[in-house]
Image (cartoon, grey):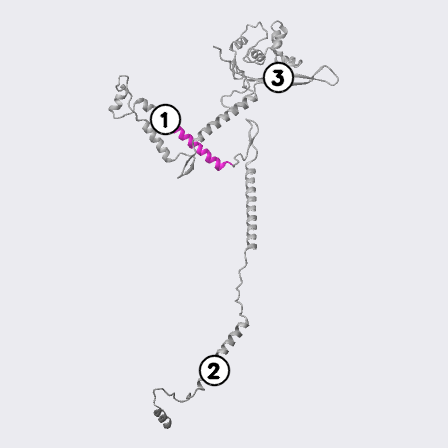
Amino acid sequence: MTAPPPPPVDETISRRTDVLQWWLSDDKNGLPPPPYTWMEERFIHRYFTETPFFDWSTKNGLIFTHAQTNIPTYELIHNRKELEATLTKNPGVEYVISHEPQLVAKGPGVVEGQKSNVWVLRKQERLFGQQQGSSTPANSSSVTETRGTYYIINENVYQAPSVADVVENRLLSAVVGLEKMFGKAASLPSFTPTTGHTYLPSAKERKSASGSTAASTQGSPARSRSASLAPETAQSLRSGSLGATGDITSASGASAQSSDDLLATRLLADSLRQTSSHGDDFMDENPLIGEPGSLKFTFSSAAIKKRRADDEAAEKKTREAREKVLASGAASTSPKPAEKVKPPTPPPVFTEARASAAKEGKEKREERKRRRKSRPNAGGTATSPTTPKSATSALGSAG
């Protein structure tokens, strides 16, 4: 059976209390000279060499190896400034202290002059350039490339993760979150002919779910191997309950799971509602600038109010101009009221024809009258076929 692989170096914490106790003791024969204090500047490089992060093939490793048999070199490794000045003389990989402990900001429980006890070491490769026309390297034109960063916080040593590891971790967290969201959202859409597409469980579905949860709590009582009722269910049966202890426990777990799912559904619905309502809002109207501990607003309150007033005035002016343009356009395109048109006068031909027709009718009537008068006995009494002639003549003589 193979042993499990060791954890990544950037996930390892190193702490050497034994080395620290050796430094605080007086068993060093006065080299380096006392006093010896806790995690002081002379001890940082020596403490870092005892951790798994240290590479003995670097320039620091060669110097510390030589110090085991050479007294002047031993004194050199306990003098930070001289050690780092020696490292700058030759190209290669080296460890230097890039940041020292800083004073802690004043606050409750902070002693005046207290420092943060955080040391930052940098692993870098020093590259020497060459002066023009010369084959010897020039120290003034040296360039360093960072290979790693390490932190010493109190007595613990950490390795800072690389930028690629940080980006990979953030992307992995985002992908996992999206997968969970898609899995939760996939079960939300539903379609029915009556309600259409919905994304939240209806009241009927919630009621049926709660009913099924309640029904699951009622099961057959547990029985022992001898086909008798289990001892823990006897009292519940006598009290009128049909559910066993195990069934009640599983039902409570299912109810808790159902309540968690309902809460997650509500949170998702509220998130969607807020996104649709405030998705286009810019909340950071007055962003912060500066560094932690000295943050300040970009604009003052008066500037924010003035900008809002200017925006409102410009919007009002634009709205009035648009309304004016719309009103003028409507007035120019509206039709004029129609004038009352008199009916056309009939042509004179119609009047003359009518008059001539009336004149002809009058002449015909007069002609008929003349014909009646020109008939015989038109002026006397007409002789009836039944009237005797003697009577007619007698009437004529009498007249």
Relative image position of residue 187 (x, y in whole percent) = 43, 31
Looking at the rendered image, the quarter that the C terminus falls into is: bottom left
Residue at the spot of label 1? 254
Please state which of residues 114 and 336 is positioned toward the viewer in this rendering.
Answer: 336
Element carrying mark 3: strand
What segment carries the magenta color?
251-279
Q: For this view, does 261 lie left or right of residue 95?
A: left
Q: For residue 140: magenta?
A: no
Amino acid, disc 2: Glu
Q: Secondary structure at mark 2?
A: helix
User: Where is residue 136, by image quadrant?
Assistant: top right
Q: Compared to 295, does 103 lie above or below? A: above
Residue drawn at x 36%, y 26% is 254
Residue located at (46% from left, 82% from top): 368
Residue under pointer 3: 124
- In percent of width and height, residue 347 lies at 54, 70
Q: Nearer the viewer, residue 141 or 367?
A: 367
Front position in the image: 377 or 284: 377
Circle 2 residue? 367
